[in-house]
Image: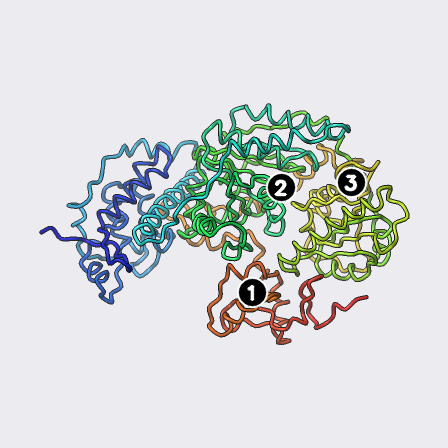
Amino acid sequence: MKRQYKAHINEDTQEVQTIKEHSESTAEQCSEFAIPILKEAVSIMGLLHDSGKYQDSFQKRIDGGKLHVEHSICGALEARKKYPNALGLMMEYCIAGHHSGIPDGGSPNDTEDMPTLYGRMNRKFEDFSAYKADLTIPEIDEQKVIEFLMKDCKNREMAVNKFAFLTRYCFSCLTDADSLDTAEFCGNAAERPLKADFFACLERVNNKLGHFVCETDLQRARTLLQQQAFQRSEIDGEIYLMNMPTGSGKTLCSVKLALEWALRKDKKRIIYIIPYNSIIDQTADVFGELFEGDAEILRHQSTFSYENEENGSEDYRKAAKSAVENWDAPFIITTAVQFFESIYANKRGKLRKLHNMADAVLIFDEAHMMPQDYLQPCLQAVAYITKYLNSQAVFLTATMPDFSELISRYALPNSKIVNLIEDTSLFERFQTCSYEYLGEIGQERLAEQAAAYPSSLVIVNSRKAARALYQECRGRKYHLSTYMTPLDRKRVIDDIKAELLRLEKDFPDCTDIPEDRRITIVSTSLIEAGVDLDVHGVFRELSGLDSILQAGGRCNREGKRAEGKVYIFEFKHIQKRPAKDERSSLARGMMEKYEDISSPECIREYYRRLFDMNRESIQSHTITNQCKSLDSIPFKTYAEAFDIIDSRMVSLVVPQDEDSRKLVETLQYTGVGAVRKLQPYACSLYQRELEDLCRQHAADDFGTGIFCLTNMDYYNPEIGVTFEAKDYMVE
């Protein structure tokens, strides 16, 4: 009787899945996931990935033996024998890392005790050749695949970057197929996928666009700009640039284009990428309301968990929790951090998503906010996905850098880039406010000037300044910063919007407004993108030109008033930051040179000078700076260093309701924390601020590494975390 080689045993039913069954099923799914040129290659990876389980020691282990058995390297060794070239090397990286993550390549001198690919490939294994009697490895046109790997690569750097990207992509196909087949056999697979009717969604968007009033010059200009974008979207391209002023309807316009492309070009999904967690709520709410019943939107961000979600049925939540793992969903809203870290990771938990970025439409909202230090790898990723994985991308912003030149310089020179708005003559219709530099001003005087407007927004550069200024303000005042939890920030933003509507209704002519009805909003920069407010006056502390113009987009947004005013100021008597603030210096120079700092010419010059000044730092974060050849790529080291978020910031959980208090109690007494459930209650602090709270016995991690506020006297829902108990008491 032929020996049965086991891959998995179902704990509930004790049913056995053989290695042959698992390998062939994984290979089949790998092939289904991959782009045509790589289907055969990833199928072979699927067949070979568990060949090490044919070792006798592994079979003893799966039958209950307490043995540690390494099996991943065996398939990599076979790939090296069969394909002693770049294709085989790609298979080695993927198969060797399919459990622990893609390893660093290392060097030929690495010994077997080292975790690099070279080191691990030097290890000795039991005979596993029995796989040859079970599995048939098909022939493959190696040269054709190698030619694809090297296409468009004019130098070593380009070859390494492309090879590294496609290795992660193949790894994504392999690990997702492996995970899905295992989950299905073990009874843990989702019962159904998330669904969306793109045709019905497009009808809803068209209906909403068709019902917009088109009476004023601004409204007519908005319609003409959108029509220009729609017409030019029919041009064949890979990356589309949508440079449209604030208030011109970029979001709806981009979603209409995405839905049309999805239907016309048979795209599998739409992925909407937003810069920060703090501004994702509004977009998620808008899309949720717009597509309700026609699209089940997957929301993936670090501060949101479907375990906490109360909306939707249980099967929807189960499907969503499963789809978060691999992005197998038709409509996804996520953050730039999640998106790019899912491309430059080396672990299967993150990289499983990468293959589902193929055959997609990617929308990058506020594209100018791509992290400058990581601009080169970010642009490369988008260029590779659109060039090689049959996707299309839209860069969306009111302050557009010269992405055509940047992509050509830092990513792929032959990317097909289409500018959706060539005629910018209508931009002046959206100039609903003027900009004035106030110079230095004290907090008290600033609060007085803001209070002179029916509604005003003051944006400052630090949370400390926001809190101090908030205490100076009178009337109906609001405060926003990341010292507050996401739950409190959302509540305050909702309150602001409701109060602005009441103010407009009660005082339509904006006269005789009592002090206690005048609205002052004090915020850090988190309000500048993704939060649609329309106030009478804006005051912006000197910062980068993009930040100043984003702030201006909250002033007289709909053009209902003759003109809004945006004042740029610097605080008196506040010590300047020691680090050179290039963005502020450049913005000051632009204000001196240009009468209208919102003009396309001013914006182009600002970004040209900014990126030229930082060319060296932009080029310092590529993987090619750390390796010289394909076999020495530091996948693991690079992934661990790829950190878009300011690493000086740490999270603090604030237990502010019954659910969060129970979660913290569980963490305290069991040492186990439901991290995702705690995230909506977590605010951001600097490490030194957290240490200060710990010294005052106001915060503790209970030995778990998850820090929680233990004394609620140090938290006020209106202003967030404080550092002296009750220091927030104001009139």
Could you tell me the amino acid type at mark 2?
Answer: Glu
Q: Which mark is residue 659?
A: 1
Q: In 3D space, how far apart are the residues under numbered discs 1 and 3 (Cα atoms)?
A: 40 Å
- Residue 295 in sight: yes
Q: Which mark is residue 366?
A: 2
Q: Position of residue 211 (x, y in %)?
A: 67, 30
Which residue lies under the disc numbered 3? 556
Question: 129 or 485, which is in the foreground?
Answer: 485
Instruction: Please report contact status of discs 1 and 2: CB closer than 8 Å, yes or no.
Output: no
Q: In 3D space, how far apart are the residues under numbered discs 2 and 3 (Cα atoms)?
A: 20 Å
Q: Position of residue 128 (x, y in %)?
A: 18, 52
Q: In 3D space, how far apart are the residues under numbered discs 1 and 2 (Cα atoms)?
A: 34 Å
Task: Check disc 3: other Cα within 10 Å, few if <14, some if 14-19, many if 20+.
Answer: many
Question: 342 or 264, which is in the foreground?
Answer: 264
Q: Position of residue 545 (x, y in %)?
A: 71, 43
Choose top left, top right, bottom left or bottom right for residue 36.
Answer: top left
| Tag 1 secondary structure | helix
Side of 136 where 571 appears, left or right: right
Choose top left, top right, bottom left or bottom right for residue 246.
Answer: top right
Side of 83 where 154 appears, left or right: right
Q: Quadrant of the C terminus?
A: bottom right
Q: Is residue 232 above or below residue 87?
A: above
- Residue 345 in sight: no
